[in-house]
Amino acid sequence: MTTLVATDDGLVGWGEAHHGRCPGAIAKLIDTTLRQLVVGMDAADVAGVWSRIYKMQLASHGMGAGTCLAMSGIDQALWD
């Protein structure tokens, strides 16, 4: 699954995040839960975005593989 991060200023970044057996699950996680956590944040604050997702999702729900894969795609897109 290709992860797209876009800013209000028109900057776009791409990342890759998928699970071989259920690629739609990662997309759904990003489009729902994780999206709500990062919308409105500064895309240049990559560490801040990662920290917020970690604190609000991984720390409260455990080290789920889906969230780790989704975070990877978001992180790649922010660095792109």
Image: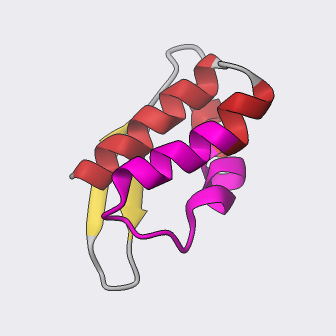
Task: Tell me the chief SS of the magenta region.
Answer: helix
Instruction: Tell me if 50 is positioned left or right of 14 in this view.
Output: right
- Percent from the top left, x then y, of residue 78? 32, 54
Residue 66 appears in which quarter of the rendering? top right
Seen at 70% across and 44% down, the residue is: 56
Residue 63 appears in which quarter of the rendering? top right
Instruction: Tell me if 16 is positioned left or right of 27 in this view.
Output: left
- Percent from the top left, x then y, of residue 17? 43, 32
Seen at 32% across and 85% down, the residue is: 9
Q: Is 75 drawn above or below residue 43 in the view shown?
A: above
Instruction: Tell me if 57 is positioned left or right of 8 in this view.
Output: right
Q: Count of labels shown?
A: 0
Please identify the residue farthest to the left as the structure is shown. 80
- Percent from the top left, x then y, of residue 51? 52, 44
Instruction: Tell me if 56 is positioned left or right of 65 in this view.
Output: right
Which contiguous range is marked in magenta?
Answer: 30-55
Is 29 colored magenta in this rendering? no
- Percent from the top left, x then y, of residue 67? 61, 30
